[in-house]
Amino acid sequence: MQVLTKTHHTEDIELRIIGPKHKKDDVLREIKKHGYADSSDSIHWRELFPEFENEPDYSMVLRKVRSKEGLTQNELSKMTGIPQGHISKMENGKLAIGKDRAKRLAEVLKVDYRILL
């Protein structure tokens, strides 16, 4: 018998609900049963950091996970075979990472490669 060993990557969606105010708690209680969360009191992180408004997500993720692993760009370059200049360009949003490089980076950085795309 085959056993499922991996969970599938899911993509979050945002719901916007309009209706009577007095039913809000009932509706939220029901949709939470299906894995949804009330984020009505949240704001997107980009609103808090407007200086990153034009910076692609992948560049900030790469920079953060590299930093979290305590690696310099040069060390990451040596471990992945990706030129240090390319890593710099990726971290500055000037070069797309691409699937092949994402997989090499992710292996060294111990993350799922999809967060780098």
Image (spheres, rainbow, N blue to C red):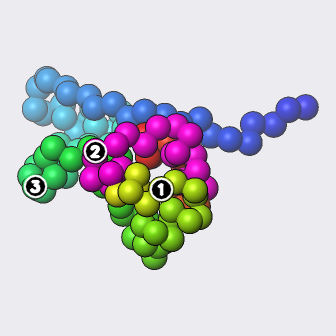
Closer to the eye: label 3 or 2: 2
Which three-letter amino acid code belongs to the residue tagged 3? Glu
Q: Quadrant of the C terminus?
A: top left
Closer to the eye: label 3 or 1: 1
The answer to whether the residue labelled 3 contacts the one labelled 1, judged by CB atoms less than 8 Å apart, is no
Q: Position of residue 83 (x, y in %)?
A: 48, 56
The answer to if 97 sits in the magenta stretch is yes
Say which element carries label 3: helix
Graded by Cα atoms within 10 Å as few (under 14), some (14 to 19) or many (20 or more), the crowding at tag 3 reads few
Residue in front for this viewpoint, 93 or 52:
93
Q: To which residue does mark 1 refer?
A: 83
Residue 51 is marked as: 3
Q: CA distance from mark 3 to mark 1?
A: 27 Å
Residue 68 visible here = no
Q: Position of residue 72 (x, y in %)?
A: 43, 72
Q: CA distance from mark 1 to mark 2?
A: 14 Å
Q: Earlier in the sequence, mark 3 or mark 2?
A: 3
Which three-letter amino acid code belongs to the residue tagged 2? Lys
Is residue 62 toward the left or the right of residue 51 in the image? right
Res 108 quadrant in image: bottom right
- Residue in the picture at 85% in, 32% down: 2
In the rendered view, tell whether residue 93 sits above or below residue 75: above
Q: Position of residue 105 (x, y in %)?
A: 53, 54
In the rendered view, tell whether residue 8 sits above or below residue 110: above
Q: To which residue does mark 2 refer?
A: 94
Q: Which residues are magenta?
A: 89-107
Looking at this rendering, what residue extends furthest in the top direction? 19
Q: Quadrant of the N terminus?
A: top right
Graded by Cα atoms within 10 Å as few (under 14), some (14 to 19) or many (20 or more), the crowding at tag 2 reads some
Is residue 16 toward the left or the right of residue 61 in the image? left
- Residue in the picture at 49% in, 34% down: 10
Say which element carries label 2: loop
